[in-house]
Image (cartoon, rainbow, N blue to C red):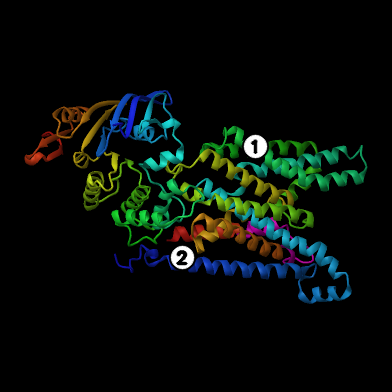
Amino acid sequence: MSSADPGSLGADATGDEDARRRKMLAWTMAAVIALGAAAGLASGSEGLSPAALWADLQHGDGGLILGQIRAPRTLGAALVGALLGLAGAMSQGLFRNPLADPYILGSSAGAGLGVVLVQAAASLGGAYISLSAAIWIERAGLVTAAFVGAVVGVAMTLSIARGAVQTLRLLLGGVVVGMMLGAVSDLITIVAPDALRGKQAFLLGSTSFLGWNAIAWMAVGLLMLVFLARRLARSLDALTLGDDSAASLGLDLAHIRLAFVLMISLGTALAVSQSGLVAFVGLVAPHLVRRHAPGAHHWLLPASAAMGAALLLLADVLSRTLVAPEELPVGVVTAVLGGGYLFWLLKQRTAT
Amino acid sequence: MTALLQANDVRVRLGRRDVLQGVSLQVAGGWTALVGPNGAGKSTLLRALAGLQPLASGQVLLQGQNLRATKPAERARQLAWLAQHGDVTGELTVRETVELGRIAHLGLLGTPGTADRAAVERAMALTACHDWQHRRLHELSGGERRRVLLARVLATEAPLMLLDEPTTHLDAPHQVALARLFRRLTRDAATARSVLSVLHDLPIALQADQLLVLHRGHLRAVGAPSDPAVQAALVQVFEGAIRIETRPAGRMRVELAMGSD
């Protein structure tokens, strides 16, 4: 077979070539993350403006703005993106489906319901408790409620699927849970219309409420998940052969699948509870890595986390600068960018 | 001597149907071909023998030990299985895919050593996929991919290989090469492997040392392909659609009985 055969572009590809592409992508992502973080620190109500940042720093209150608002927000956006990218790569590997996203197990619907419940409670109870108490419940309660809701959503999916033994059951369970919990939260917003606004903000995703506390949690979670996921990465490689072939290699799939389901839900619950439903990052980040520097999962998992961080940093800067001094919910930016990317990919695929 | 693999009165139910009933057999070594018409239960039997299919009753013994009591990792070192439909996802290269066979020895955390690399090299050499080891599976043709998946099975270096339709997608030269490979692996004292393969390709199946004829979930005949009783059972389960001729030097020829219309 000649290497000029147009049907096999990869015919020349050697192991060195693959390693070179992975190295290239790693450096590119590092550069984008560094630039994105710098831009994030320099973006404020005046858009992306290093001059304004410099002026702020001269006046003394710049430290406060940087330390309490921009730095946690920028770092937080990177962490949320990394968690979603990693969870997305784990979902796509576990479900052997390039369209799987981290919300596939019902965590998003659960988190959404949690948020709606707390807000409905705050608005309905507002008549009986003080305003400050209601606000406190909303701020502290939302994160917890979203986290608990996400975990409950996944638990429901697992119980419908009778554990993590069958992939198809898990997928169907996720769909059923998504519909049921979505319907319940719709019902609640009819009873308590005040919860609708909070729900909407949650659905759009936002990086504007990230604080240092959240960052500590997410950083610890991310480090733990990357470490564990890489240790189990070989099982995702084996799953590319199919469930039975992986089982024939002596792997305990029931336990491995359960471990990944728990890791995916922890990652998404951490991200979703802090920033709402940021769309497409978990789907697109692993895609970009696989497209530009494919490889086994011990590379794919951490690289998808880095890609997610880079993507959400960029999206966060865009969301703050496009319509400054106003800002867009970051989820809108990722949806437009991610959706556009998938649309372009689809057009390319059909063209060839 | 205990049989390498033994099935005692195996029954498998899928939904409300008994797909296998009262199947007892022994694989002592050599190359065994499992044949029968569509829906006979060949793949299910192979899956049951590989420990991938729960049994409604009966038992499977691997080297005298109940398969259900064998640890999965231990089973994987003794017995390798090739799926009928090798639909592969992801972007692994040929080499990375063949290396997966070593999970049977390394588990999830082990680091591949010299023996592992040597096994991978041998498996790729035996299936002639060494030259394109850095290509990705989705860039390969169906037949090439089949050879890679077979190499993945060979790389486990398990003494017993259960292969579901290993010749699917292979062109004639590679089918012949595969049949020769099976003969060599099973007859060479140094490798001493045993192969049990589901084959719907009868001309290749007749090259095996032993035939198992399965029909509607029952084992109808067991024996050498030259055994007249086995040949008669074959013609019967294929409803007279084939004719088997024994040629000089024990060679057999099978053809479709088209009749004269």
**Which one is nearer the viewer's eye here, A16 or B65?**
B65
Say the numbered circle drawn on residue A139: none
- Tell me the residue that label 1 is attached to: A155
> The residue under label 1 is which amino acid type?
Ala
Residue B49 lies, in percent from the top left, at 36, 33
Q: Is residue A210 left or right of residue A129?
A: left
Q: Amino acid at mark 2?
A: Asp
Say which residue label 2 marks: A18
* Residue stretch in magenta: A319-337
Residue A258 higher or lower than A102, as above or below = above
Q: What residue is rendered at 10% in x and 36% in y?
A: B246
Q: CA distance from mark 2 to mark 1?
A: 39 Å
Q: Which secondary structure, mark 2? A: helix
Residue A338, image x and y in percent?
60, 58
The N terminus of chain A: image quadrant: bottom left
Q: Residues within 10 Å of mark 2 (few under 14, many from 20)?
A: some
Percent of width and height locating residue A181: 68, 37
Outermost residue, left side? B248
Other residues around mark 1 within 10 Å, as few (<14) / some (14–19) / many (≥20) = many
Q: Is residue B170 above or below residue A116?
A: below
**What is the number of callouts on the image?**
2
